Image (spheres, rainbow, N blue to C red):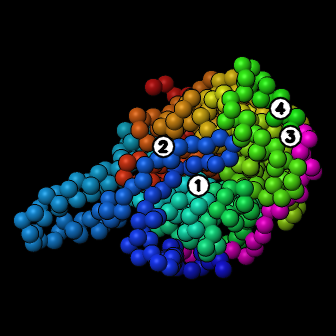
């Protein structure tokens, strides 16, 4: 059973397994993994946040109410002082974004969409309505694919308003994780939401879904009036995929392929010929790209093989079919931009060796793609990115341009359609924290709207930033 935006509850209390006390059940779900990928290449989990700290830190109003109570025992004063410090830290985190915008007038907005939260909040999407309203989507739960309480949430910032709405439910397939989100506003003004539902607590078991809304309710929530599945039947790519993998492995490891890498790819090779794994496991990350013909390209990827593919629609999203895959060693989560000559360029997260963003080209409107090759000048350590073509023809990418880590998030600008990236400016650059999985669009006023997952000590949230494109090139 699924729930949509019309229902008031955002979070479902999961039943306690038989033989497990309610307290033990809470502790079983106390941690939040940070984007751990079990595919061809994996990342180490972050330390778990203990339940006691969560109770003290969230929400801020509860903490302040504790501070207002009288001291009933001699030893309570140090505890309350500790809670006060935590409350101050949380308040400082929530207001730091506004202070950041005030220090730099050219940074038109920098704000947290909701206070730091102890649950896992990740993978946003954003759209702007013609009237200037902004809607952001993301997922929240006690984890990712292995947590059955993960739901898709949204928040709206009405044109002219200074605050984002309280998070509201956009979708929940009860008992299954609903994960990575992206959104799209079509030529008819309909809002499209795409996300995967994970069937068996593994990325290779996910199905990409969509729903669309013709209108928004008075409170800003989408009024959904259509939904479906993006089911793909790619042409058998087992032989082509096998040949690409073997060639890339030889080129990528001239001194010999490490044993662990051998084992990982041997397992992938066993699955390549199977229809189940060729058709299942595709999921979205970056927003669709619409071509001048009206064709919609929805970028998808699979952690089963660490390949990407395009779901293609020539009828406004009513039906979908598969492109040929983008082969590579960890070529996932593409963002697609179009050159004036019609060439499509896909920039991808690199989930394999090399530490550079992967790039592929299509010269037939997204049907076939070159084997992914490393960018010469954009580092990537296994982190998502996004891009947008501006109305003046310039291109902007937003990425963690680092050989490792996600503690710097940068805007990159190209004035030659991606042939070079001469201009860069960091939105976030800190010793700690993760600022990642960004999404970016250009608004009707010409400004850039970016949203990204914001992970710091004390919790997780979505951060929204608004800048003029020339902010990237401005003297500083």
Give the label, 4 or 3, closer to the camera.
4
- The residue closer to the viewer here, 449 or 33, is 33
Q: Give the CA distance from mark 4 to mark 1.
A: 35 Å
- Which stretch appears magenta? 218-240
SS label for mark 1: strand
Q: Give the CA distance from mark 4 to mark 3.
A: 9 Å
Q: Give the CA distance from mark 2 to mark 3.
A: 33 Å
Q: Give the CA distance from mark 1 to mark 3.
A: 30 Å
Q: Please, is residue 252 above or below residue 39 in the view?
A: above
- Where residue 106 appears, as percent x and y from the top left, is 47, 38
**Can you tell which mark lies on residue 434?**
2
Return the disc, 1 or 3, that comes first in the chain's sequence. 1
For disc 4, the marked residue is 246
Give the label, 1 or 3, closer to the camera.
3
Residue at 32% across, 54% down: 90
For disc 1, the marked residue is 124
| Residue 456 visible (yes or no) | yes
Q: Name the image quarter holding residue 57.
A: bottom left
SS label for mark 4: helix
At label 3, counting other C-alpha atoms closer than 10 Å, the crowd grade (few under 14, some 14-19, many 20 or more) is many
């Amino acid at each position: 059973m699924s729930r949509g935006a019309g229902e008031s509850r955002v979070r479902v209390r999961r039943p306690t397994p038989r033989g497990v006390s309610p307290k033990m059940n809470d502790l079983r779900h106390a941690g939040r993994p940070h984007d751990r990928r079990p595919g061809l290449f994996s990342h180490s989990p972050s330390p778990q946040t203990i339940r006691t700290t969560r109770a003290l830190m969230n929400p801020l109003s509860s903490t302040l109410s504790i501070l207002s109570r009288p001291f009933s025992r001699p030893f309570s004063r140090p505890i309350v002082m500790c809670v006060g410090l935590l409350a101050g830290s949380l308040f400082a985190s929530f207001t730091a974004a506004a202070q950041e915008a005030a220090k730099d007038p050219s940074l038109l907005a920098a704000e947290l969409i909701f206070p730091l939260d102890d649950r896992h909040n990740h993978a946003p999407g954003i759209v702007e309505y013609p009237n200037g309203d902004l809607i952001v989507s993301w997922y929240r739960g006690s984890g990712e694919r292995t947590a059955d309480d993960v739901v898709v949430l949204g928040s709206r910032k009405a044109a002219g308003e200074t605050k984002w709405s309280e998070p509201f439910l956009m979708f929940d397939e009860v008992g299954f994780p609903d994960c990575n989100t992206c959104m799209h506003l079509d030529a008819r003004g309909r809002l499209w939401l795409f996300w995967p539902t994970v069937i068996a607590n593994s990325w290779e078991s996910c199905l990409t879904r969509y729903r669309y809304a013709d209108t928004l309710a008075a409170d800003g929530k989408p009024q959904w009036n259509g939904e479906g599945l993006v089911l793909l039947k790619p042409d058998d790519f087992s032989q082509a995929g096998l040949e690409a993998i073997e060639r890339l492995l030889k080129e990528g490891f001239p001194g010999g392929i490490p044993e662990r890498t051998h084992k990982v790819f041997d397992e992938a090779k066993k699955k390549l010929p199977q229809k189940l794994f060729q058709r299942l496991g595709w999921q979205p990350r970056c927003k669709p790209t619409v071509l001048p013909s009206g064709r919609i390209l929805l970028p998808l990827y699979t952690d089963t093989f660490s390949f990407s593919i395009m779901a293609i629609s020539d009828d406004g999203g009513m039906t979908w079919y598969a492109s040929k895959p983008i082969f590579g060693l960890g070529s996932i989560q593409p963002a697609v931009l179009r050159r004036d000559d019609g060439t499509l360029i896909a920039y991808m997260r690199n989930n394999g060796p090399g530490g550079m963003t992967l790039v592929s080209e299509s010269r037939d409107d997204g049907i076939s793609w070159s084997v992914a090759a490393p960018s010469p000048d954009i580092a990537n350590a296994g982190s998502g990115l996004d891009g947008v073509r501006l109305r003046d023809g310039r291109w902007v990418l937003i990425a963690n341009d680092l050989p490792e880590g996600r503690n710097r998030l940068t805007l990159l600008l190209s004035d030659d359609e991606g042939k070079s990236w001469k201009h860069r400016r960091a939105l976030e650059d800190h010793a700690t924290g993760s600022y990642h999985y960004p999404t970016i669009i250009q608004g009707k006023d010409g400004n850039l709207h970016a949203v990204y997952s914001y992970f710091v000590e004390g919790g997780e949230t979505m951060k929204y930033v608004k800048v003029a494109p020339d902010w990237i090139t401005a003297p500083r």
